[in-house]
Image: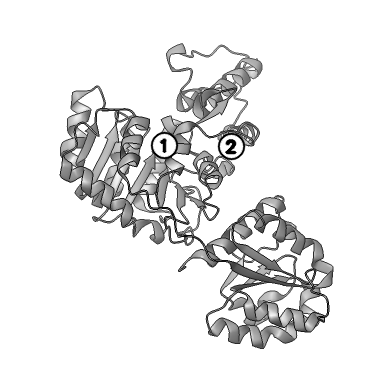
């Protein structure tokens, strides 16, 4: 780390031990491997847009080849597609929906880059991603961080508060998509016009940035910035939004060529530019980090209660939970010889660290409802009990079910009504794992 003093280096390394080092990922980190070659997500999307423009536009557009790989530039040109009579043929929502569709196809089985893998091998508890992809999440999960949480900000969302975010930790890191998520077209920030609208609302805090994120951006943190174009105007506004960052130590490899830009960020926001590239910077840092392995996770037990009619729902949840390490599952399908169902169920409830209730109309009309007073007492004594709304029913009329440790999905929307049920079950399994592993 050429331009860092010994004290700066030591303080940065210590920040990993105290979970006070925050990693910011910029657009240049948004890439994936294809046939062994690294491909920029934004450049590939710009290429797809250009192909679409060539196919559908009937009046020539003035597109500068110099900017043909800039998504924000090509996205703006996409909105100028006209028919032979000169009538505009697309709307902003068409742009965002196309990007979402292409990303789902392009990134479905995409391989994270070596830089993603390197990041995943370090002890970052909070990663703020300024791109819409989840490649860093995949790298973290591949590295064994099965409790990784992903949340994102949607500047078009009308809600004043965009909900709670889980507390990040080294074992259960949080990745926060600052500028939306490619799978939610309503959240995307693509064109320059989008960026203007985004920062106008973002700086006004409408909708509000989650408090759970803001409380981690105080004056006692260290920040590492990778993959940003320091000459871009949005970066100045980003720093302006988080004033405490200017009182923190911030580090960035690949010093900008422009002396004016470099001096501005160094003098105004205390950014220390290090004369190296992203991977060399992290490798140097990793070599100096403590090599203490993550503590072994003790065995955690989950008991699943469901009506007979909801056997497939239980199987869906179990399939999503099995990849997580050190978890033992129990449901009515798991029976030891010589035990009746009531005896086996009671032993499972007593031993469980978390009890999952798969709620439906069948559940509400089953003998399992007689267990609610006992489950309430177990919750009062520290056991985690989660209501999972699998199908439409009047669960919210039963106070006990609404007052469990958590209701999933958030808001209580029935899973069976979702168009992406498998994804919902995956997210629920991840949240259950986070509940199990938080606070040890």
Q: Residue 93: give its label.
A: 2
Rendering coords of residue 393 (x, y %)? 75, 71
Residue under pointer 1: 195
Position of residue 77 in the picture relative to residue 413 (left or right): left
Q: Compared with residue 220, is residue 225 higher up or lower down, i.e. above or below?
A: above
Residue located 55% across and 28% down the image: 33
Which image quarter: residue 256?
A: top left
Position of residue 172 in the picture relative to residue 214 (left or right): right
Q: Compared with residue 23, is residue 160 higher up or lower down, i.e. above or below?
A: below
Q: Is residue 390 visible?
A: yes
Measure the C-alpha gap from mark 1 to mark 2.
15 Å
Rendering coords of residue 330 (x, y %)? 71, 70
Rendering coords of residue 293 (x, y %)? 42, 53
Rendering coords of residue 230 (x, y %)? 30, 31
Position of residue 158 in the picture relative to residue 323 (left or right): left
> Quick one: label 2, few (<14), some, or many (20+) residues within 10 Å?
few
């Amino acid at each position: 780390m050429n331009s860092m003093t010994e004290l700066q280096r030591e303080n940065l390394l210590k920040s990993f031990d105290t979970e006070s080092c925050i990693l910011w990922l910029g657009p240049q980190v948004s890439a994936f491997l294809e046939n062994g070659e690294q491909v920029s997500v934004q450049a590939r999307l710009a290429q797809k847009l250009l192909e679409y423009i060539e196919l559908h536009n009937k009046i020539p557009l003035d597109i500068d080849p110099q900017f043909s790989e800039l998504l924000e530039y090509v996205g703006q040109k996409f909105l100028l597609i006209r028919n032979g009579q000169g009538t505009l043929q697309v709307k902003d929502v068409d742009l965002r929906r196309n990007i979402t569709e292409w990303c789902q196809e392009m990134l479905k089985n995409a391989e994270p880059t070596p830089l993603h893998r390197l990041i995943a091998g370090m002890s970052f508890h909070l990663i703020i991603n300024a791109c819409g992809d989840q490649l860093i999440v995949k790298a973290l999960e591949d590295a064994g961080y099965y409790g990784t949480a992903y949340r994102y900000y949607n500047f078009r969302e009308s809600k004043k508060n965009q909900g709670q975010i889980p507390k990040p930790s080294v074992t259960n890191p949080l990745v926060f998509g600052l500028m939306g998520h490619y799978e939610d077209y309503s959240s995307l920030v693509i064109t320059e016009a989008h960026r203007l609208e985004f920062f106008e609302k973002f700086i006004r805090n409408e909708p509000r940035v989650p408090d759970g994120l803001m409380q981690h951006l105080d004056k006692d943190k260290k920040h590492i910035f990778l993959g940003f174009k320091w000459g871009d105007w949005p970066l100045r506004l980003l720093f302006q939004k988080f004033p405490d960052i200017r009182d923190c130590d911030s580090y960035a490899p690949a010093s900008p060529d422009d002396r004016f830009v470099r001096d501005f960020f160094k003098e105004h926001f205390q950014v220390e530019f290090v004369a190296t590239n992203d991977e060399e910077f992290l490798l140097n840092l990793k070599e100096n980090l403590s090599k203490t392995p993550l503590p072994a996770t003790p065995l955690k037990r989950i008991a699943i209660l469901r009506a007979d009619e909801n056997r497939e729902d239980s199987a869906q949840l179990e399939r999503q939970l099995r990849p997580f390490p050190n978890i033992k599952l129990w449901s009515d399908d798991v029976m030891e010889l010589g035990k009746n169902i009531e005896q086996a169920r009671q032993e499972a409830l007593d031993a469980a660290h978390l009890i999952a209730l798969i709620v439906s109309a069948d559940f509400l009309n089953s003998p399992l409802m007689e267990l609610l007073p006992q489950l309430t007492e177990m919750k009062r004594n520290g056991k985690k009990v989660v209501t999972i709304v699998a199908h439409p029913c009047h669960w919210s009329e039963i106070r006990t079910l609404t007052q469990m440790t958590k209701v999933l999905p958030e808001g209580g929307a029935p899973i069976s009504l979702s168009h992406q049920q498998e994804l919902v079950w995956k997210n629920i399994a991840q949240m259950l794992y986070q509940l199990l592993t938080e606070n040890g």
